[in-house]
């Protein structure tokens, strides 16, 4: 790999890292897992003057479920650490389902959840998952911390709303309103491929009634597709075959797929619809079995 | 007592691969591992566009970068008569573009610098002004009258046609069609793919002004051919050129041609008088080096009602990219395409082939195949599948009726090949049993009633491996024989060198086993060396499954020469006449007294210490082997799939492979080759293809877009073995390295098409991406051609 020449710093605290970003006025880039940034540097699509490697900031390396059910994922939590993680699986089934589908096992040992959300790839799995979950990102800059709701954070393809001198230090997913269930389905051409189409669904159930429903899509638009409005039709209702069918159709309608060598726009919409149906039907079946 | 052949690692021993020890420890020695003192680094600037006139090249900014030593352009190459070089198919290829660029990724300039980072920076600093020309990305555009002539550099070039060629008996074929009850048709595209070896191409050229010697370490599957070519192109005397192929990280045909990068690095070393290293990056490898396939195939089969094949008409339209650089025997313009249907008793056949230039990378290499045999067999098995359906006959039964029977050998095929051995029916039976063919029809019907789509695909074929015989097979006039040289040291250990070139096939392991079989010297006592033209005997290299059929035969033959000399020594040691000596593995003994004997090691020592009067000392020899015929392995593959009707995703439920490659030298290595080939077959069927958009941009220039399956997707394989020894090969072996890549893809496609057969689907072209399968199953229509690459709704 022969990238352009760049400077490299490895700060030990967030404050130092922020100061470095500030000092380079937009010409510096944060390096987390490097699984998106490094390939771009290899292709020389990105040629940052300065790399601020945050991997030495041990404080950012965590994921935890708090007593009230709030989940906090630090900036150095790797994809791999969300896989086979019983606490996460219980708290946020959608994350547990998506984790083994992100990239490949090698990439998962390095890539970070927060880095992936920052990267805001329209085909990225975590930006879609976060969008469905509806949490926020904690950003830290020279003036301290601020919370950015996910819907205001990922605003376009490869675009987030961090200032040049801010670091995303944590992703926060709110406690569920009831029992949280969910799933993630992804159509990919092979392991390590980005999504042709993928669907993140998260539901909070109170008894057999839906208290919260979030759905977001990857791969079927020029940006992460927020289908939470379509999903919200389920709130206050029971999961039934009819409700499922109408939500699946509504979600497929908000997808913005384009025809390319992975398939026609119609095909991708069909996949979205099928996946929403399969996930919700699966959730319905398990809740009936549990009852 | 004779030695236990398996214990000494002889024929039939599943001996562990000798080369793996260094590879898994990271101790391999690849071109990029070699560091020479004072070495400079070369990087190529490639064309971003597919077709354009070069208006100007400004290299001045590149020279402003500290550490840049030399920048080469086409003009500078032309001044030395090196702007163009000959290809292996009697065409020419640009080394560095002078007038025009003709495909995306074509070499435009080269920077030689202190390190590769600087070289890359300097490439970015070169300013090239292009005037874009109309782009041609398929043969149909190329053949349109009035379309832009790509090779206007050539005199007398008729439009974009490369060749027009035919073979077979047209009159007999026409007659067969006149008598047919049923005529069945098939039309398909075998998409372009790239062999994509793990290691890219590269070279280190080291010209020593003081000695006049040029040493080139390079990634070549055929180092001796390179030496000959360099001698002709660079006008250096052949004895002053040494080509060394060290460990190769895969080849698959991709490392047979001679690439511009090699030639430029040689000139750069001559000019700078220091070694120059060039290591291609992955993108460069994928977009500019030898590809495979890219052929449109059409045909029709004449049939009798009872299922007997009567005749076959075939036509191919092939896309060769900007330069006709196919690596194949020179006599045949579209490789051994006419080996199609060799397994079937087909009375008459005719093939017409037309090749075209397009604005795509040149190549047409034999990607894990014996020169277009992959396309031939794929078409054959898709045609057979369609014909059986058109007749309303069972797939297996139709094959059984038409396959050449055991008692028909030697059998002359309709296109003139001579197949010599096989038990096709037996292979078919074994495969049918293993896949559960008996109960399958009922199972399929039951599954359909539950909305599940099950399918079984069969592919049966024999293919011509081991070019050549020198009467018919040559490359640029050089006959396709091969060679081995064996030297037994005084302690009975030995070194063997051949003209083949290992790149993953396990020659170091298996050649030693042939020596063990012939001489009784344990395989562990034999060093195998290949790839250095100063030490290895001349050979045509490794591709087209030719190593075992040709070089492997030479190994057996040279060992027999050694044994003949050792016999004389044994007679001398045992004080009897040579006629009274018998041989058993590892030992000569006196016929009348089996106890009295000497080992091969005793003879080796005597060759240096106690030879008979008048005998030349030493125990070494060489053999050049010109095979009397090709070898004809047989393969019967069965694939069972289930298609998800809502998504088009297909899962492989079972793969059964029955291979008859004659005598197996090392069964484990053979199985490894078959599994690797089946993986590539699955890859072709499911995802691995290279395509271009309308502007000639290569989609598939990196491994996120050019898809290779991982261990995760790749199905498991159940392997079965049948052994029909090759009648003319010294140890009865046939080629096998490519059977599965060749016959495998059709089994996968036939399975998916079978699953969808009741919906009216006759064909889905590869790759069978889920969206394409979904479209076929929802519309009942065939899916033809490459996936569209134009973006937008
Ligand atoms: C072969 C391969 C396959 C892949 N497949 C998938 C896939 O299927 N699905 C998928 O979702 N992803 C996939 N990825 C991407 C992978 O998940 C990345 O890990 C992820 O997109 C980025 O996370 P990272 O930690 O590696 O970020 P980096 O590459 O280090 O950074 C990415 C970008 O985000 C910025 N950034 C990172 N962290 C922060 C932070 N804390 N604060 C501010 N800015 C930050 C960086 O400056 C950079 O611009 C794949 C990657 C590879 C190499």
Image: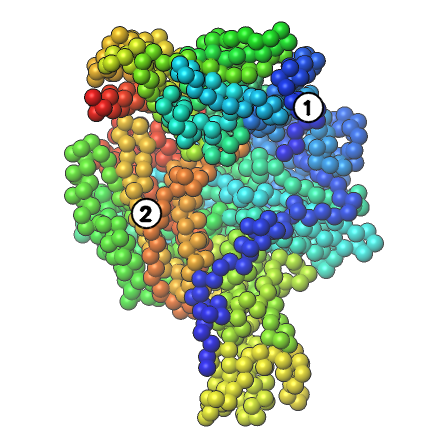
Residue lying at the far front in this picture: please name it. Answer: A67
Q: Quadrant of the C terminus of chain A?
A: top left
Mark 1 sits on what residue? Answer: A9
Q: Residue sitting at 59 percent across and 88 percent down?
A: B573
Q: Residue sitting at 52 percent across and 46 percent down?
A: B365
Q: Is A59 located above or below residue B115 in the figure?
A: above
Q: Residue sitting at 45 percent across and 74 percent down?
A: B4
Q: Nearer the viewer, residue B625 or B535?
A: B535
Residue lying at the far right in this picture: please name it. Answer: B210
Residue A103, disc: none
Question: Residue B111: horizontal and vertical position, in percent?
Answer: 72, 35
- Residue B340 visible (yes or no): yes
Between marks 1 and 2 in the image, the one whose residue lies nearer the viewer: 1
| Chain of the residue where label 1 is placed in the rendered structure | A
Q: Quadrant of residue B213?
A: bottom right
Mark 2 sits on what residue? Answer: B655
Q: Residue sitting at 18 percent across and 42 percent down?
A: B443
**Residue B180 as seen in the image, left or right of residue A270:** left
Q: Quadrant of residue B188?
A: top left
Q: Element under label 2?
A: strand
């Amino acid at each position: 790999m022969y990238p352009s020449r760049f400077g490299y710093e490895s700060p030990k605290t967030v404050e130092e890292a922020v100061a470095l970003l500030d000092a380079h006025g937009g010409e510096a880039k944060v390096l987390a897992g490097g699984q998106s940034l490094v390939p771009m540097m290899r292709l020389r699509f990105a040629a940052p003057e300065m790399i601020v490697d945050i991997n030495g900031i041990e404080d950012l390396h965590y994921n935890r479920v708090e007593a009230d059910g709030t989940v906090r994922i630090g900036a150095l939590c790797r994809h791999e650490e969300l896989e086979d993680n019983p606490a996460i699986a219980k708290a946020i089934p959608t994350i547990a389902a998506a984790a083994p589908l992100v990239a490949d096992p090698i990439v998962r040992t390095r890539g970070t959840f927060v880095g992936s959300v920052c990267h805001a790839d329209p085909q990225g799995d975590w930006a879609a998952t976060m969008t469905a979950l509806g949490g926020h990102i904690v950003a830290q800059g020279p003036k301290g911390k601020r919370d950015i709701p996910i819907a205001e954070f990922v605003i376009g393809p490869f675009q987030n709303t961090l200032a040049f001198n801010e670091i995303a230090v944590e992703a926060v997913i709110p406690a569920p309103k009831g029992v949280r269930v969910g799933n993630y389905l992804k159509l990919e051409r092979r392991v390590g491929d980005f999504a042709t189409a993928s669907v993140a669904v998260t539901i909070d159930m109170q008894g057999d009634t839906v208290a919260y429903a979030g759905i977001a899509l990857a791969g079927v638009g020029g940006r992460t597709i927020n289908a939470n409005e379509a999903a919200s039709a389920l709130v206050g209702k029971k999961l039934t075959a009819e409700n499922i069918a109408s939500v699946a159709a509504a979600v497929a309608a908000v997808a913005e797929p384009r025809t390319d060598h992975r398939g026609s726009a119609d095909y991708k919409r069909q996949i979205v619809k099928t996946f929403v149906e399969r996930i919700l039907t699966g959730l319905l079946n398990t809740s009936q079995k549990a009852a | 007592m004779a030695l236990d052949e398996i214990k000494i690692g002889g024929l039939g021993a599943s001996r562990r691969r000798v080369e793996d020890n260094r590879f898994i420890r990271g101790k391999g020695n690849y071109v990029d591992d070699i560091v020479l003192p004072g070495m400079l680094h070369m990087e190529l600037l490639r064309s971003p566009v597919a077709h354009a006139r070069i208006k100007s090249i400004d290299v001045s900014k590149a020279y402003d970068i500290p550490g840049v030593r030399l920048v080469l352009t086409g003009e500078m190459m032309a001044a030395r008569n090196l702007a163009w070089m000959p290809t292996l198919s009697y065409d020419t290829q640009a080394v560095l573009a002078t007038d025009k660029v003709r495909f995306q990724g074509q070499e435009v300039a080269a920077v030689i610098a202190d390190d590769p980072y600087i070289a890359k920076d300097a490439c970015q600093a070169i300013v090239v002004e292009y005037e874009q020309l109309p782009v041609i990305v398929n043969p149909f555009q190329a053949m349109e009258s009035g379309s832009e002539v790509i090779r206007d550099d050539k005199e007398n070039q008729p439009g974009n046609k490369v060749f027009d060629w035919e073979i077979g008996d047209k009159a007999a074929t026409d007659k067969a069609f006149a008598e047919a009850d049923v005529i069945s048709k098939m039309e398909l595209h075998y998409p372009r793919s790239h062999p994509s070896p793990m290691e890219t191409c590269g070279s280190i050229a080291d010209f020593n002004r003081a000695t006049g010697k040029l040493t080139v370490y390079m990634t070549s599957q055929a180092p001796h051919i390179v030496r000959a070519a360099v001698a002709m192109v660079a006008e250096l005397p052949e004895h002053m050129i040494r080509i060394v192929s060290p460990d190769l990280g895969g080849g698959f045909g991709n490392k047979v041609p001679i690439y511009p990068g090699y030639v430029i690095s040689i000139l750069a070393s001559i000019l700078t008088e220091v070694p120059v290293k060039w290591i291609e990056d992955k993108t460069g490898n994928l977009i500019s080096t030898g590809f495979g396939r890219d052929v449109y195939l059409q045909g029709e089969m004449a049939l009798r009602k009872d299922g007997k094949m009567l005749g076959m008409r075939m036509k191919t339209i092939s896309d060769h990219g900007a330069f006709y650089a196919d690596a194949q025997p020179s006599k045949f313009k579209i490789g051994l395409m006419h080996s199609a249907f060799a397994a079937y008793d087909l009375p008459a056949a005719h093939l017409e082939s037309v090749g075209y230039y397009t604005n795509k990378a040149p190549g047409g290499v034999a990607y894990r195949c014996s020169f277009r045999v992959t396309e031939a067999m794929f078409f054959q098995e898709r045609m057979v599948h369609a014909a059986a359906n058109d007749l309303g006959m069972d797939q297996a039964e139709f094959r059984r009726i038409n396959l050449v029977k055991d008692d028909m050998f030697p059998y002359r095929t309709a296109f003139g090949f001579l197949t010599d051995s096989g038990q096709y029916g037996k292979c078919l039976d074994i495969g049918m049993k293993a896949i559960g063919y008996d109960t399958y029809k009922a199972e399929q019907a039951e599954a359909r009633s539950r909305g599940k789509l099950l399918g079984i695909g069969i592919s049966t074929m024999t293919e011509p491996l081991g070019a050549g015989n020198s009467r018919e097979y040559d490359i640029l006039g050089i006959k396709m024989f091969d060679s081995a040289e064996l030297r037994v040291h005084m302690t009975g250990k030995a070194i063997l060198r051949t003209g083949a070139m290992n790149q993953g096939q396990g020659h170091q392991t298996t050649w030693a086993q042939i020596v063990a079989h012939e001489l009784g010297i344990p395989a562990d006592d034999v060093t195998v060396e290949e790839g250095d033209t100063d030490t290895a005997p001349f050979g045509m290299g490794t591709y087209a499954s030719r190593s075992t059929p040709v070089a492997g035969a030479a190994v057996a033959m040279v060992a027999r020469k050694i044994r003949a000399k050792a016999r004389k020594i044994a007679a001398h040691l045992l004080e009897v006449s040579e006629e009274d000596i018998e041989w058993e593995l590892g030992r000569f003994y006196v016929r009348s007294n089996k106890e009295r004997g000497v080992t091969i090691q005793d003879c080796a020592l005597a060759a240096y210490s106690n030879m008979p009067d008048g005998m030349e000392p030493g125990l070494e020899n060489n053999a050049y082997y010109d095979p009397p015929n090709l070898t004809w392995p047989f393969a019967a593959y069965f694939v069972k799939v289930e298609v998800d009707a809502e998504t088009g995703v297909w899962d492989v439920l079972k793969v059964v492979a029955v291979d008859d490659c004659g005598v197996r030298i090392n069964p484990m290595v053979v199985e490894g080759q078959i599994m690797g080939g089946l993986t590539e077959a699955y890859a072709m069927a499911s995802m691995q293809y290279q395509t271009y958009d309308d502007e000639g941009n290569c989609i598939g220039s990196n491994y996120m877009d050019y898809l290779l399956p991982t261990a995760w997707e790749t199905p498991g394989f159940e392997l079965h073995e049948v052994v029909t020894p090759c009648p003319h090969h010294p140890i009865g072996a046939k080629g096998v390295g490519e059977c599965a890549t060749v016959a495998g893809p059709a089994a996968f496609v036939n399975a998916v098409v079978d699953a969808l057969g009741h919906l009216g689907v006759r064909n889905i072209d590869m790759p069978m991406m889920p969206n394409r399968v979904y479209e076929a199953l929802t519309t009942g229509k065939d899916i033809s051609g490459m996936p569209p690459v134009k973006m937008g709704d």
